[in-house]
Image (cartoon, grey):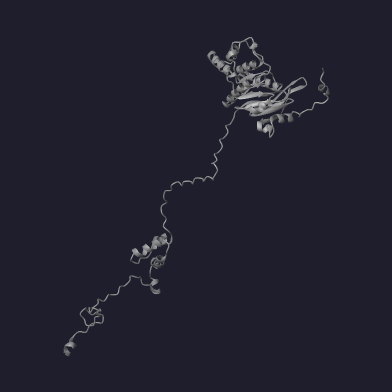
Amino acid sequence: MDSDADDREPLSASAEPGPSSPDAPKTPAGKPAARKAPVRKAAAAKPTPATAAKQPAAKRAAPKAATAKSGTAKSTIVKSATTKSPAAKAPTAATASSAKSPVTKAPAKRTPAKRPLAKKAPGKASATPPEPRPVRETVLVLEGLSKHFGTTFAVDSVSLSVSSGTIFGIVGPNGAGKTTTLSMVTGLLRPDAGKVHVHGADVWSDPATAKRNMGVLPDRLRLFDRLTGSQLLYYAGVLRGLTGPTVKARSADLAVAFGLEDALDRLVADYSAGMTKKIALAAAMIHSPRLLILDEPFESVDPVSAANIIEILQKYTAAGGTVVMSSHSMDLIQRICDSVAIIVGGKVLVSGTMEQVRGAQSLEARFVELAGGRRTAEGMEWLHSFSD
């Protein structure tokens, strides 16, 4: 028995007892428990100082890059270099530079960024940009216009400029030179000095072109009063180069506008002062001129006819025509004129738009102020004692 036990080969220290071995641990139920082999974690051994010098730079940077929390391109490149290449190779110049600098990607196509809409202020309407004013053409230009009668200067170096599409008013006291100025503008009176241009044409060097663009209503009417109203309009239209049918059609329209339908077959000599003024204005407008020169157009005209004439002139200027008129009615000039000039003693004291000339006061108050102010009547006590 002992010899047999001595002849057995001793067990190695590393051998594990089997399930039938008497030395195997037993569970409470009496069954032998299987011993689990120790699981080894695949953790990279910490390099010693001696081995760390031999490892490439990419591997040495791997632990630091692996523990970095930011997902930058640099850490991603270092991780892929350490995990995918098991063999320790010396880094090339390309890999070394890629490890240090981030990878530059091809620029993506940019879509045009949409501008954010401007937020509207609460309670306020969106302000729209003002429309630009149209550039108006200069139709009438007066340059240093002068006229004297003996030693009296009726007009002394008057210079004015009138734009298209406007009604320009000339006001002044009696004898201020308004009628003399308009007579020189229309070519009825030759000036002593200065020039007048109507739509670019000189009134005295090129009168045919200048007068073709004008319609004139003079102060002292000189009409062929032995003609009927219809005949007078026909003569004025044919004289301006219009055909017969055109003259008849326009004469009918003007007669309706001025309320002269029943008076066209009567002699002009039988017309009243207001009707004579209206038939003369119709003759001045029949050829549709660019410029109307009207000297006291509302004198002796009733209020109804005056309102019709104002409406006709406003539609005419809205279509691009130009009106230059003189009047003693300050209220009328202030209501219908866009610009105004005040002439006193043959000189222009002030000119410009209506707002510029009158300022904060009325046109009448401004006119009285420039014309010398009001005069008080003294020494007329006899007027207060009535004769029986």
| Residue 385 percent location from the top left of the image | 82, 21
**Frontmost residue, 259 versus 206:** 259
Q: Say if 273 sits above or below 26 in the image.
A: above
| Residue 64 percent location from the top left of the image | 41, 67
| Residue 209 percent location from the top left of the image | 60, 20
Q: Looking at this rendering, what residue extends furthest in the top direction?
A: 226
- Left or right of 361 in this view: 90: left
Q: Looking at this rendering, what residue extends furthest in the bottom direction?
A: 2
Res 145 visible: yes
**Frontmost residue, 104 versus 23:** 23
Q: Residue at x 73, y 29 (%)?
A: 368
**Frontmost residue, 145 versus 351:** 351
Q: Quadrant of the C terminus?
A: top right
Quarter of the figure with residue 61: bottom left
- Left or right of 182 in this view: 260: left
Q: Quadrant of the N terminus?
A: bottom left
Res 224 visible: no
Q: Residue at x 64, y 26 (%)?
A: 168
| Residue 305 percent location from the top left of the image | 62, 20
